[in-house]
Image (spheres, grey):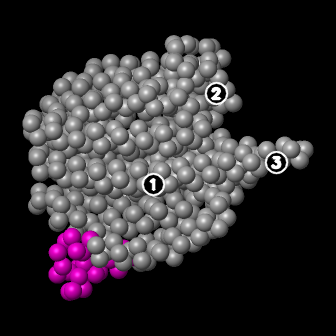
Amino acid sequence: MTATALAEAEQEKTTLNAKARSGSIWIVGAFGASQVLRLGLNIALAALLFEEAFALMAIVTAVMIGLSMFSDIGLQQNVVQSPRGDDPAFLNTAWTMQVIRGIGLTFVAAVLAWPLATFYGANDPSALELRWLVPLVALTAAIDGLRSPGALSAARHMQVARLTHIEVIVQICNAGITLVLVWFTRSVYGIALAGVLSSMLYMALTYWVLPGPRPRFMLESDAMRAIISFGKWIFLATLLSFMAMQIDRLAFAAMYPLAEVGVYSIAMSLAMVVTALIGRLQIAIMFPWYARMLESGMALEQAYYKAKMPMLIMSTYFVTLLIVGAGSFFELAYDERYAQAAVFLPILSIGIWFSSIGGMYGAAFLAAGHSKWIALVSAVKVGSFALLLVVLSSTDGTLAMATGAVLVSELATFAMSRYLGWRLGLRSLRPETTMLIMLAVCSAAGVSLVQRFGPVAGLHPATQLLVLGALTTLAFAPFFFKLVYPLLRQRDI
């Protein structure tokens, strides 16, 4: 390689590192703000609506996510990974397939609405509302399919700031619209209609904010073959991923009263905050960065450990906060109907910690071309949880016991991810071990303070949360400093 080529490669690497840094900052900052907004919205909705409303929306959301994953062939991943990702013919073909997919999802969801309502209505009559809720929410699939192909190009070039701007605007508007509609309707339909209006706003903003030529319908044969060839394992992986992520709420809604499942759904939504953050970083930062770094000749192991430790520290920190603050938070923010969520949340959070690590391995598998391994990991989670459900169904197990089954399935999934990572050369266990010790020690100390240390146990729940948050942050401060200091000095990821 000539000196000029080496200089250009080094410049490209520097540019990608800068994009990764700035993109991570945008994602973490916007994500934190959006979660605060989302949390406030959920607390307000819990006061305005009945518990069953959360279970109904959990079912509807699971159905829509499931249909989306069942038809996912990795359109965004194709555009990010393919050498033709900037080719207008390739991009328009991906956009046309996106539009067709969205319309198809809306139609299928509408057809499934009545059978789903009948199935869940046999356990709880409140579920009969699904006959109308599912078709209404299904409109979002067709609207999302019309989003500008500029969104696909922005993902390829790690233009995270522009995408984050759109997401923040939509989230703020969605919160306001939801509160207004629910206030006047006092119905779960207010949430559903707000989702449709927010999807329309998001779609419009992708054309207004993101640059690019006007899209046109096109189905180039070569582009279609490339997309389907790359996406076949992604299709299977996302199909299994849906079952892995949503099978608990879908199964529990058929086994337990919807009021209990609604409380469980609130706890799960809080625990999933960590997964959502890590997943967002994986999709927007890790996968594109891996792909470009591997193209430049960097070893996967080196790239993986550079990217892994910051996210591992973040996930451990947030999971610790969820565990130590669960009791105080639900005592402060929710009424006694939701008290059981304080039992569910710590159990689910531990499972989420292991799940987040598995997701980090998944990004490495995908970048290394082993998309079928992601499907295998998801199959382990689905299979292990299904076996545990069989055991639960033969006993009089409570929903708290069922929550423990979710944790066990996450442990089995982590074990498989770890084994596959070892096969890929990612063999160091030191980062996971260090953070697991931190998680155990800090969580045990925080819970003990609230339950057994009189001066803290007697405080107001809001004050307890402030004390626990400050102590947890102080405990993790050396790790945060270790991450930030080299970045300030070397300006390298």
SS label for mark 2: loop
**Picture quadrant where residue 337 is located:** bottom left
Of mark 3 and mark 1, the one earlier in the sequence is: 3
* Structural distance between the alpha carbons of marks 2 and 1: 28 Å
Q: Which residues are magenta?
A: 442-465
The answer to whether 275 is drawn above or below residue 478 in the figure is above
Point 23% across, 65% down: residue: 329
Crowd rating for badge 1 (residues with CA inside 10 Å; few <14, some 14–19, many 20+): some
Residue 28's disc is 1
Which disc, if any, is residue 39? none
- The residue carrying mark 3 is 7
Magenta: main secondary structure equals helix
- Helix, strand or loop under label 1: helix
SS for tag 3?
helix
Which of discs 2 and 3 lies nearer the camera? The answer is 3
Is residue 476 at least partly visible in the picture?
yes
Circle 2 residue: 86
**Residue 411, x across and y down, in percent:** 45, 59
Q: Amino acid at mark 1?
A: Val
Quarter of the C terminus within the rendering: bottom right
Earlier residue among tags 2 and 3: 3
Q: Name the quadrant containing residue 366.
A: top right
Q: Is residue 232 depicted above or below 377 in this figure?
A: above
Apparent side of residue 360 relative to residue 395 in the rendered image (left or right): right
> At which x and y percent is residue 477?
47, 75
Whether tag 3 and tag 1 are in contact, CB under 8 A, the answer is no
